[in-house]
Each structure stands twice: as structure tokens, then as C-alpha cells.
Amino acid sequence: MLLSVRDLVVRFRTHDGTVNAVNGVSFDLDEGETLGLVGESGCGKSVTNLAIMHLLPKPAGRIEGGQVLFEGVDLTTLSESDIRLIRGSEIAMIFQDPMTSLNPVLTIEEQLVETIRAHRKVSPADARTRAIELLGMVGIPEPASRLKSYPHQFSGGMRQRVMIAIGLALEPKLLIADEPTTALDVTIQAQMLELLQRLTNEQGTAVILITHDLGVVAGMTRRINVMYAGFVVEAATTVDLFAAPRHPYTVGLLHSIPRLDAAADEPLIPIEGVPPDLRVAPVGCAFAPRCAWRLARCWTETPPLSPLEPGTIVKTTGPEATHRIACWNPATAEEAVAGAPIRPGFVPAPAPDGKVDVVEEPGLPAVAVPAGPSHEDGA
Amino acid sequence: MTAMEQPVEQPLSVATPPVPEQVLEVTGLKVYFPITDGIVIERHVGDIKAVDGVSLTIERGTTLGLVGESGCGKSTLGRAILRLYQPTAGKIVFDGQDVTSLGGGALRAMRRRMQMIFQDPYASLNPRMTAGGIVGEPLDIHHIGTKTERRQRIEDLFQIVGLDPAFAERYPHEFSGGQRQRIGVARALAVNPDLIVADEPISALDVSIQAQIINLLERLQGQFNLTYLFIAHDLSVVRHISDRIAVMYLGRIVELASSKGLNTEPLHPYSVALLSAIPIPDPAIESKRRRIILRGDVPSPAAPPAGCRFNTRCWLKERLGNPARCTEEDPQLRELAPGHTVACHFAEEVAGSAEQRQVTGRPAPAAVPGSLPV
């Protein structure tokens, strides 16, 4: 086991109250494994990884519970100087925006050599040789002469290649890529994903890929955790998750994006409402207000992440990892295809007192709406 | 029939056009942004050719999707059609009337019938106006209705886009991203436009919210017979909402086809690459797909490559042994199938190629396709 995150709780203390960003997240990762963390903005996927790396904004963000075991060592207990030895050399990160994550006043050479020499006792000349090799590895033409360039002299895709070079410079055991292609065009995204996959395969690097794009994780990862409002709501191998999604949120996500290979007139089934306010401590299932499958108990009891078949011995890693969901009333296979509950007579449990049902869609107007002023009058 | 008989060179007469099926007709549109040098005396040293000779038409009640990567000129084209940018050359005919050089009151009157939905629902709403004020502002600007009529209209608009009319007194920061975009849609609808240019209307929204807005736009189109120019970089979204799709690259349309035609039989090498680059959320399909990885970046629109603009990145050119024609002759749009035009000298080579079969999911031949550029 390379990484084991156990019951991680992260909260932010802000002027507007405490934000419950991560509410007891657990997952494991083996050497060389690829794990996707999927969810929308605010679901806690990025915060989880900032917490692993001791990069939470201070003093607001705090780990308030749980452990992060990396090769058996609990990272949450390490001092700032100890985590520095791990950050960059054992665990590296690639961020979304390659412009803001490179230093604009340093050349590419300075930034690459700085990373290498901070962790390895090598001469400047050797570090430079290694830097040239790395730039060549990520596909930058004429690497020796491009070393003298500044970040602004590179295109977005080229900058992200430099970020990948810096990330992999010290052959880390774990690479955390947080939305690495979101800021890039699709043809550049394809270049980047292909590069990332090839290099991490060659080096045997374990990867945590954080993204909102289900298409990206489908091709890039072996396992996926779907997150919602600071909880892991579904965990499965990539194959199982897409073949048989069971959590209503996962089902909803898959039905709300148009697929290139689907019939063009296939209707989208949106998830109604909006994600919850994380300043309110979660009671019951966080997804209940938007869920078409909810039962009365969903409003009051938080479902644990547990295997589909009760009593199954849980495997948390590897190609045989157990399919687990946090749901009292999972979608059936037919319902996952249909995108809605299709049991005869099923009605989602109404909101109890003090809870708000889906807020955004107050229903379509029942009567035809007047067409408004015509073009002939006025102006 | 009548369209067929029209000679290509015939100037569009101003006198009595028949009731046009085309809401919008753009011919040879160019939008250049000057590059200047010098501090006191500015010298004109070049042009960013953001849109460089684009022609398209949109029929009433239909959606034309405009797809391309950042910097291809798709947003500039959308804005130039609304006359938010002054076209450098070309002609924009809206509902039978040439609007290319309209000014003042005539332009304002015309703008009432063409509205826009913006990408960023945070930046496009005035934070100091109430939601009701934002939706009602177009009515004020165009002096439509009395005060009570306007208030009623705002209430109706809120209902049309699925917002509680009681929210009209709230300010933009009190709404979520999806709700803000609904306000933006309501504002565009306020003056009963014929044409709505939607520039990346869902890109800034979360995945679960995107479908709400797409469904809303589709419902409104049916309800009010709206015509959309839908600009986006995401081909799977564009395909879902569009009747026809124009693919842009470096200021030009390289392929224009029905939504189905583009997806089942893309004929431009760039369209094929674009389709292949889009990940499909299904690991079984993804493991079998082979992407066409385009080399390098999009060239600068200030100095587009000679000949075909895509030739510096084209996989087909390489496979055909770099024919000189690609770098010498600028390909024009030509019709290869009814309603399916493409600007590539060798589009016939794309039809039925292994690459095309791969991205469209058609059964591949027994032999493994040969050399895909890496």
C-alpha cells in the first residue's frame, strides 16, 4: 500500500462560518495504480489532495481528523520541514493552470534545476543535463535552447509540458494531477493525456487524477471515487463504475453530459437543484435534496460507504476492488440506464420540516406564457 | 430551387427580398484587429486575422453550432454578427436586411432582434443591479411597454426560465452559477429576439448544471421559434443542440455540415482529429479508441501558414507524402455531399479512411490501420 487516507476531515474556518469541505474520506492506493477523483466544484476533491500535501490555505484550512499514511508514515503529523522532503520528490503535483503555477520571472532552466537540486545532491551541470533530458522527454523541441526561455514564451500546452517535466523530475512514487487539462484545448488535452499516461506507465508512478470530466477518467484511470459535498459516494473500478453505476448522483452525472457516441436526439436528464451549502453541517445524505430516489431515512441518516452486497469482504485497491456506494436506495441496473427511478408508484420522500427541497426549479409555468411585446410597437 | 438558380456573383438586391427562410446570411466576413507599434506615432504593422472570410447562413428556428479551439475566431465571428465588432469586410444580412453598416437608431432597432448570452454568468451581470432590473433593462433601453407591463413581463420571463419571480429583488451574488445563467437567458429573451448568439453559455457551469441550461435553451427554442448561433469548444455539446455545425480553424470555416453528417462522416482532417480528441465516458470504448494526436499548437492568426491553414498540423498531409498543393494553394469550401461542404484539397482521401472509421465507430477493416502520427 502506497497511500492510505483514513477518515480525513477538513474544515475551513471563515468569516461566514465553518465550511465542511471534506467529511470523512477514506481511500487506498497501491504502487503504480491510477485513481480518479471525480466530482463538481466544491465536492472536496482538490481539498483532499491539498490536505495530503500540507498545502491547505492557512490558517483557515485545518485537518480536523483522520490520517494520511504514505508508505506507513502519517503525513498529517509531519513538521513542515519533514513534509518538504516528501513533497516534490516522493509526491509531486500538477495543477490546472500552467501559467499561474510557473514562476513568471524565472527561466524554465532555473525552475527545473531548482527542483532537482532542492532534493538531490547533484552539480549544477548535472542538473542542467537532467533538465534538458526532461524537456526532451515531454516533447519540447530543441530542449537545450528552450531552457533559457521564460514561461510567457511558451504556449499553454507547452507550459503544461514543462509542469509535467517538473512534476516527474525526481521520479516521484505518486503524482497528483489536479484538473491537468481543464485549461487546455481538446487537441492539446489529447496530447497531454497521452504524454502523462506514457510517462507514468514507464516510471511506474501512481497517479491520482482529479477532474470533473468523466470522459477523461474513463480512459486514464483504473479506479474511480465519485465525490459529492465532501463525501465519497461511490467507489469502484473504472470498468464497474461505467458499466453499472449505482449511486443516483453518478447516474445523474452520466446522464447530464451529451456523449459523442450517443444518438444525437437522446435527451439529457439534468440533476435538478444545486450542490448544498457546505457551511451547514450535513445531516442525512448530502445528495438527498436533489435525489429522485430518496427515501425518508435519506433525510436523516448519513449512508456509509459500503459494498453493494452486504457482507462482502472489501478490497480497496487493485483490479478486483469492491464496488461500494454510500446510498440507502441505490439505482437498479435498469434505472441507471433510464436515468430515473422506474419502480411503479415510487415517489421521492418529501422534505421533512426544516429541510429545503430542490431549490432551483420551481416548476415550469403551467399556463402558456404570453409572448410579450411584439416588434411593431415602441422603439 | 430559387436558391439554385441564383448566380454566385449576383449582388444581393436591396429591393423586396422574398420572405427569407434564412434569418442570417453572412458572406465573406472578415474581422481584422490591427497590430500597432510605436508610442507617440502608432504605425500599423500587421493584422490579427481573427475572422478571415467566413460565409454561413442560418435558417429560422434552427441552431447552427460553431465549434473550434481557443483563438479560432468563433467568438469574434459571433460578436461581429451582432455588430459588437465592426467587420473589416464582408456582408451580414439579417432577416433580409443588410446590417453590415447600419448605425445609430437603425442599428439599435435591429439589435432588439438579435441578443446574446455570455459565457461567464459572474462577469456578465451587473453586481449592483437586482435580477429583475437586469432582466428588465433591455425593455427600458428599447422603450417597450409601460411600467406595469414591464413588471409583468419580468415576472413572466422569470417563470419562463424556471426562476421564482419572488427572486427579482435579489442581487446576482445571491444566485448560484446556474441560476445566474438563467438570468442571462431571461435578459436575452426580454425583447423577443429572433436570433440569439450564445457564446459558450455552459462552459463556466458545473457538469450537473450544464444539462439544466441545455434543456432550457432547447425548450425555449421550441416555445418561441428562436434561432441560435451556439458557440462552444465542446463538440459533444454542440452536436447535441445543433442542427448544423460549422468547424472553425484559424479564422476560417473548414467544414460545414449537418450535425449528423459531421459526426458520421467528418471530411476535414481537422474535424476528424477534433472528434477523436474528445474522450468518451466509457472505458470499454476508450480502451479501443486510438486518438489522432495533432502535433504542436495552433499557429498565430497574425501570420497564418501559406496554403491550407491546417497544413502545419495535418495528419493527412503527412500520410499523403506532403503534397505541395497543401502549402501552395488555399483550399476553398466545396460541396462533397448535399449540404456538406469542406475546405480540403484531399477530403476524398478522408472519406472511408481508417481514421474516419475509428472516430465514427464504424467497423474497421481486418487490417490494423497503419501509421497514425504520434
Image (tube, coloured by chain):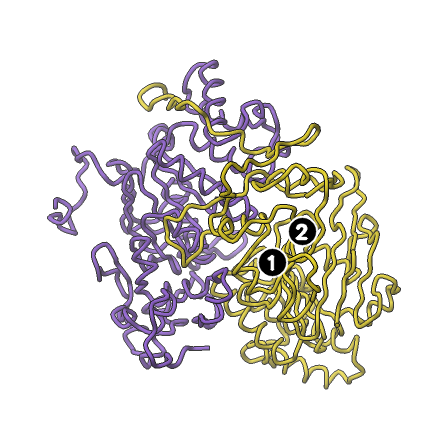
Chain colours: A yellow, B purple
Q: Position of residue A157 (x, y in %)?
A: 55, 66
Residue A211 image label = 1
Q: Is residue A171 above or below residue B42?
A: below
Element assignment for label 1: strand
- Mark 1, other Cα within 10 Å: few <14 / some 14–19 / many ≥20: many
Task: Tell me if B186 is positioned left or right of B171 in this view.
Answer: left
Q: Give the chain of mark 2.
A: A
Instruction: Name the residue nearer the viewer: A329 or A221.
Output: A329
Instruction: Name the residue nearer the viewer: B141 or A333.
Output: A333
Mark 1 residue type = Thr
The label nearer to you, 1 versus 2, is 2
Q: Exactly how many numbered labels are in the figure? A: 2
Marks 1 & 2, CB-CB < 8 Å contact: no
Q: Is residue A82 above or below residue B184?
A: below
Task: Using the rendered image of the protein, determine whether residue A99 is visible from the camera's viewpoint.
Answer: no
Marks 1 and 2 sit apart, C-alpha to C-alpha, by 20 Å
Q: Are marks 1 and 2 on the same chain?
A: yes
Snapshot quadrant of residue B235: bottom left
Q: Position of residue B150 (x, y in %)?
A: 46, 18
Task: Using the rendered image of the protein, determine whether residue A121 is visible from the camera's viewpoint.
Answer: yes
Which residue sits at x=72%, y=86%? A126
Snapshot quadrant of residue A123: bottom right
* Mark positioned earlier in the residue sequence (1 or 2): 1
Q: Position of residue B200 (x, y in %)?
A: 47, 47
Mark 2 residue type = Ala
Residue A326 image label = 2
Instruction: Name the residue nearer the viewer: B184 or B264.
Output: B264
Which residue sits at x=69%, y=55%? A306
Q: Is residue A78 above or below residue B124?
A: below
